[in-house]
Image (spheres, rainbow, N blue to C red):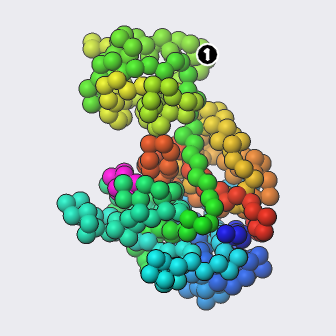
Amino acid sequence: MAVRIASTLSEHPLATHAVGECAGGLLEAGGHSPDLLLLSVTPPLTGALEDILGATRALLAPGVEVAVTTDRILTAGREVTMTTALSMCALWVTDGLTLQTPAGVPEPRVKPIRLSGCIDWEKPDDSELEQLRAATGTLILFGDPSLRRAAQILRSISEVAPGLRVIGGTTGSSRSPGTARLFLDGQMHSDGLIAALISPQVPTQATLTQGCTAFGAPMLATRAERNVIYELDGRSALEVVQELLATVALDSRPAARDALRIGVAQTNEPDHDPIHFFGVLGADKAAKSIMVEEEVGLGATVQFALRDARSATEDLLAVLSTLPRAQACLAFTSGSRNLAYFGGPHHEASVISEALPATAVWGISCCDVFGSNTAGVQVLDHAASLLTFPVSRRADFGSI
């Protein structure tokens, strides 16, 4: 299935002018009635978002319209923050193929999905997750940053739809309940999750970078209880960590302690990217143990890693180097991966645009990032989750 994708950005301080610039660019790039329209605004435009969406629907008539607020917008080579900005990304399916359900009913290429977050875990057959059961394709998912059970919901999505690719994050400038602004087809929600489910016939590729560089050899957790590791390969966990940190360059050792992460691998032979990196919280000198953010099972294979601006850049470049030529890239990046962290503006947007030339880039900053890897769908901090649309022979694309 061939698709056409374009993204636009306006920093005009007047919402009416910003809509005209963005919508006009999309009309020129792909025409009327895109199958999906993604829209994001920075905080100064939050109060005008309903009017922006109304005007956009009148101009473009998208099949599914999803809109969120964000502190930072990524586009081709640039990142916009601390100013007024509106960004849009549209997707058109261009080959005219009509999809049908098993009952012969026309199937939309993109479906709107709403999850209130109030899922009845005792009656899974009656829950909202039934609308995703056995679904395949790609789910672009946005959530309320105050949602406390996001990780459990994502695990449940993986269970009911193991073949579904999920990407996105929680958005907004505050984690306080009721402050989120999630718009789905003109309806505003201040809690739960909204999503666009893209047909499996639209080719996509999801990748994840956790910004970590593994060091030291993989080890077995030979004594562990919940989130406390007492022994690694039969030795005290604290001694192992101290020895590993001693191998780090002297001038970066204090930073290494702050940036130390641990990854749990699925097998005893992990590749360079263990399933999931999480934090090392502290140590108990008396017990010679370490405490980590998540539970580590007895016998699990673990590997330590460092996470800093350099490792984040190196890991992002490594991930991008594995991707085929893409016509578009959607980027969902943690709010902590910002100007202060990288020491300069436009860092991630520039890296993505240089690695994927001639690619339409649309991205936002998230409080938490949703990403898929071999462990399933997870809620991650300090990560970046990327969705790319490979170039096809008939594809057309652009960033305006």
- Chief SS of the magenta region: helix
| Amino acid at the residue labelled 1 | Ala
- In the rendered image, residue 78 lying in the magenta stretch gets the answer no
Indicate the position of residue 392 as horizontal and vertical percent values.
75, 62
Dot 1 crowding, Cα within 10 Å, few <14, some 14–19, many 20+: few
Indicate the position of residue 105 as horizontal and vertical percent values.
48, 84
Q: Quadrant of residue 146?
A: bottom left
Indicate the position of residue 71 as horizontal and vertical percent values.
55, 59
Q: Residue furthest left?
A: 122
Drawn side of residue 328 relative to residue 106, left or right? right
- Seen from the viewer's position, the closer of residues 96 and 121 is 96
Quadrant assignment for the C terminus: bottom right
| Residue located 45% across and 64% down the image | 135
**Which residues fall within the magenta stretch?**
150-158
| Residue located 37% across and 27% down the image | 300
Quadrant assignment for the N terminus: bottom right
| Residue located 56% across and 65% down the image | 200
Residue behind mark 1: 249
Q: Quadrant of residue 359?
A: bottom right
Drawn side of residue 5 relative to residue 130, left or right? right
Drawn side of residue 220 relative to residue 305, left or right? left
| Residue located 48% across and 52% down the image | 370
Element carrying mark 1: loop
Residue 121 showing in the rendered view: yes
